[in-house]
Amino acid sequence: MAKAAEPELGAPQFASHAVVEPFIIVGIMVASCYINRRRGFTIIPSSKPDDQGLLGQKLETLDEEDPLSEDYDDLTSSGTISTKTGPKKRNCCGAIVHTPDTSRYANYWHSRFIQKFPFLVEIFYWAVNLLFYVSVKAASELIFATDGVWKTAESHGIAVLNLEHDSIFSFLFPVKEVDVQTWFRTDHQVLLTILNRAYSLIHIPVTVSFLGWYYYAAPTHAQFAAARRMMQLTNLFSFIVFTTYPCMPPRLLPERFGFFDTVRREDAESIYATNKFFNQLAAFPSLHFGYSFCIGTVLLYHSGIFRRRLAPRERRMSKMWQAFFAILSVLYPAFVLTIIVSTANHYFLDAMAATGVVLMAWLCNRCLLVLLPLEDLFLWCVKLSKPVPTTDNRGTDTSDSVRVLKLKGVKSGGGDQGAFNSRTPGRAPTRKASASDTAGDPPV
């Protein structure tokens, strides 16, 4: 009896991905830290007559009515930085919470290090996200330990297909996922190979690259923070759904459904598919598409096409750059959707659900502000002063960043002061900050 011909699935991922991917991600993080470093600031301050060393340097006192005596922190407009060591006031769900003021630690060596590389704070936030993901994955396995999470996820995956194509909602899904994959498998193997190898590279590496870029390019740190919180909540909401509704991706369904695993063959696995941190039964909603939709919406906002009013110090882009960002904001999510469906890693409903999760995350993103008191307590425990972001004050010497650093008692320590005086491309000249600049987070 003749053996059935093997289906054409294109070339899988490179087997070296499991080794290369972590180095790519770490390299992007290191590059982001360097690009977003505080110029003109040294970790070890220069020796001057009034310099009392790393510990206990003399603080410069500014007028407490100065607008920049408000907390520069992106998460709240109610925090204050004391010129001494008084407590901060945090508005937590309408209640005023007093937390320790960590500005006294501003000249400790680890505070100065993170002041030099403030993007390290963003890396820490995403490490917390990973910890939460590992926790909910363990919770999911515990919840479905009796019935078997695999069987439950399979039934959920079949239910998704039935809803898409055998229910009153079928008109929303005119194209079947299996037909999309079949089209690529039939005489389009080169395209399928590209999609197979892009599957993992467009997820974490591109997302981290976007965060590093937008930290640099955002007109204000408040806008970057709003986008970051939206992505963090997208993670958290998705993790909760993964826990309560494990869903098997099409590639793992029984053969009768006609799907093939085109990405993971011949031991060519992504690092995220081969370790305990990867949840193969987390198809619904799609974090791949959720991240891409977040990035797309931020790029569209950044273009300024639909904004009549710009942020302080933001300049209107040229028509060419507006068109570039607007087109990219549509093409990138569309490309990711094509990848996840053609490789049988997600259903169309997964992407639709991810869109809803992102919108809900945007509407609720300020709910993360309730964690500020916990952050203050953590910083106090490790004796760390939170750095001033470089997003909207890079290239300023006599106004924003240096005035806040002085308020925190941090000395610049010499260095290339000319870098502070250079004007950042795409921004208007620095002006004196007003209270409206630091009070709250405008929508991204």
Image: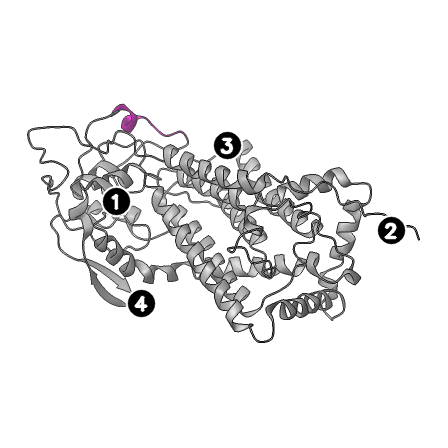
Kindly identify the amino acid type of the residue bearing the numbered disc 3: Ser
Q: CA distance from mark 3 to mark 1?
A: 27 Å
What residue is shown with label 3?
318
Q: Earlier in the sequence, mark 1 or mark 4?
A: 4
Q: Is residue 324 left or right of residue 373?
A: right
Residue found at the far left of this picture = 49
Look at 23% across and 47% down and name the residue there. Answer: 385
Residue 341, image x, y percentages: 69, 52
Residue found at the far bottom of this picture = 146
Front tag of 2 and 3? 2
What residue is shown with label 4?
93
Secondary structure under the numbered disc 1 in the rendered image: loop
Q: Is residue 424 magenta?
A: yes
Residue 443 seen from this side: no
What residue is shown with label 2?
4
Q: Label for residue 15?
A: none
Q: CA distance from mark 1 to mark 4?
A: 26 Å
Front tag of 1 and 4? 4
Does the residue at mark 3 contact the one at mark 1 (Cβ under 8 Å)? no
Q: Earlier in the sequence, mark 3 or mark 1?
A: 3
What residue is shown with label 1?
434
Q: CA distance from mark 4 to mark 3?
A: 42 Å
Front tag of 4 and 3? 4
Secondary structure under the numbered disc 3 in the rendered image: loop
The quarter of the picture where residue 250 lies is bottom right
The quarter of the picture where residue 60 lies is top left
Kindly identify the amino acid type of the residue bearing the numbered disc 1: Ser
